[in-house]
Image: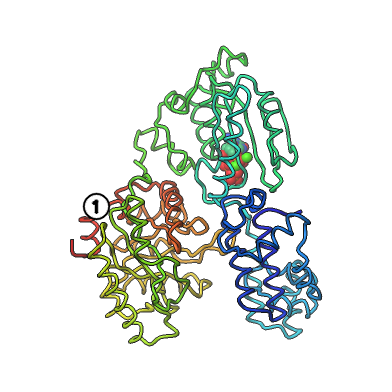
Amino acid sequence: MKTSNQEIAELLRSAAAALTIKKGNLFQIRAYETAADGIEHLTSETKDYWQENKLDQIPGVGESIRNYLDEYFRTGKVKHFQNLEAGIPPVVFELLDIPGVGPKTALELAKLGVKSRVNLSKQLNSGELVKKGFSVKLASKITSGLKEADNRTNRMLLPLAASQSRVISDYLKKGPGVVACDPLGSLRRQVATIGDLDFAVASKTPEKVVDYFLKMPGVNRVVSQGEAKVTVMLHTGLHVDLLVGDPDSYGALLQHFTGSKHHNIKLRSYAQEKGYSLSEYGVKKIIGKEVKSKNKEKTISCKTEDQLYKLLGMQTPAPEIREDRGEIEAALRYKLPDLIKLEDIKGDFHLHSNFPLEPSHGPGINPIEEIVGNALALGYDYVGISDHSPSFTKHTFNEIKVLVITRNNYIEQIKSTSKIRVLNGLEVDILTNGDISVPDKTLKTLDYAIAGVHSSHRMAKEEMTKRILKALSNPYVDILAHPTGRLLNERESYNADWEEVFKYCAKNNKLLEIDAYPNRLDLRDDLVKMAKGLGCKFIIDTDAHEISQMEVMPFGIAVARRGWVEARDVVNTWDYKKLAKWFNLKS
Ligand code: DGT
Ligand code: CA
Ligand code: CA
């Protein structure tokens, strides 16, 4: 039975597609899609929720879907879904996964004789589909969609990886003779997506720890096994690597298994020049041309990572920056950056409320007062509300103005009674020609504006660069929202000349947003580092549409740290006075 969250989400999406094709109830279709989204973003497995009788805690899953999920976990199928899908060629469901292919297009492709994804690709390349009457424009859209799908890796997002890893660590820590246990690899480096989980354990009895690990609930099969190391696959399909090492050399094991591979390779060759040999088993002194001896006495004790780096005459780089992007050189000069920490954050600026603004994109679900209350509970000094602006296509400029002014007045009232500073912002759209979806005279009434690309992501690089630069040239735009627009495992980054955009931002005091939402994190760490190098300032915020999502801030901090960002580079670590000056607000 397929039980990963991804697979359950697909099950629901297929049902939604079948309903769409059969012209079913729109609310029901939406309900399946919402449930699929909720499940995809869970930090635990749906099956665990089911086993613990907690399906009702999954956001977006109502009673009827709960019953279907229950039937699925009990019997491996959902009768109702099978009935819905009856009569629809199976290839339709296979094609739905391709960006740009919806249920109706998939059905049309099936009717035109497409047999599989591979066959679709063939018929597109040979021009056969278009000859059969398929739209040229759609054909080209699907061709790029297929390319995008091929590049997808389906790596796990950080929140799920972190919560799975906690369960495994908790288990391992109770193992026989376990002195310490740490999750390492890309999770410790806080990479936005995780391939597999890696654990190190310090113990004098490695065989016993390996045996114990193999008995962990959820282990499906052993992929490979040695005396002190083992790789297993869980029922969810996830791979887990375990390495057990001597507590005296645990620092070397931590260092090795944290990686990254490139960092390790560089560090090892540097160590060699200094006369040391590094490995997961420990640090050894090289005498002459050879590692002096394999026996244990010659191994240099190295209980912590700090000892290892100190031995090599350098600072310990934070795990997040161990990517061979200059950190070894900086560590040798004792010039590592003082990376930003979660505690440095004094407020969140990208938050959506349920204020009736008739917005262009999804509103939030909480009233502004609740968001402000939650910001206070999180210990913030200030909070900015940034609803999507009123829909540009459905309103005249004058109507937009009236809606915004109504909201301004409402927020003014909240400002006057709130215990923390409240800022009145909007998230506005960067239209295809670079114009902003809200007129200047209305933008002027706000404390700040975040501008983002929310449509036509597929523009050519030069055009997109021009579009963004034009938007940023608007004097009332303060922040470039979620640059690159990627959605992890879903949508690729859009193309732009980032160097040009960043130079413009640095020169004109435009902030770059690091959107902490875990499937976005779309100002990627490599771009953050480049922007920082060019002198840009940042704002890290959560893009929360529900107050519990305000807790995703650590993922944004992780990206910032991976991009070498210090607290002083991030405006929402500043005190209100300095911040007010930046945004030209009354202090
Ligand atoms: P992932 O799992 O794809 O998200 O990325 P990582 O970094 O967790 O990679 P993984 O699980 O293959 O290996 C964990 C760590 O083990 C890696 O960060 C560094 C170390 N390592 C793995 N392969 C090599 C290697 O070929 N050479 C060196 N020096 N270290 C390696
Ligand atoms: Ca890994
Ligand atoms: Ca691994």
Residue 494, how many percent across, how many down? Answer: 51, 66
Q: How many numbered marks appear? A: 1
Q: Quarter of the image holding residue 183?
A: top right
Residue furthest out toward the top: 297
* In front of the other: 11 or 148: 11
Query: Can the viewer see residue 573 in this picture?
Result: yes
Residue shown at 59% from the left, 44% from the top? 164
> Residue 372 location in percent, x, y?
33, 60
Q: Which residue is mark 1?
A: 575
Is residue 544 found left or right of 574 in the rendered image?
A: right
Percent across and percent down for residue 87 are 81, 76
Q: Nearer the viewer, residue 446 or 513?
A: 446
For residue 84, which quarter of the picture?
bottom right
Ligand 3: give its quadrant. Answer: top right
Say above or below: 171 vs 523. Answer: above
Question: Where 454 sits versus 131, above or below?
Answer: above
Give the color scheme: rainbow, by chain, secondary structure or one colour: rainbow
Quarter of the rendering occupied by the C terminus: bottom left
Residue 401, compared with residue 232, is above or below; it is below
Q: Which residue is found at the position 37% from the left and 62% from the top?
A: 370
Secondary structure of residue under mark 1 = loop
Quadrant in which residue 452 is drawn: bottom left
| Residue 289 in the image, given as x and y percentages of width and height | 57, 19
Please indicate whether residue 284 sits to the left or right of residue 357 in the image: right
- Tell whether 151 sits left or right of 544: right
Viewer-proximal residue, 426 or 122? Answer: 426
Judged from this view, the residue extending furthest toward the left is 587
Queried on whether the Cβ of the residue with tag 1 lies below 8 angstroms from ligand 1, the answer reads: no
Nearer to the camera, 478 or 309 = 478
Q: Amino acid at mark 1?
A: Asp
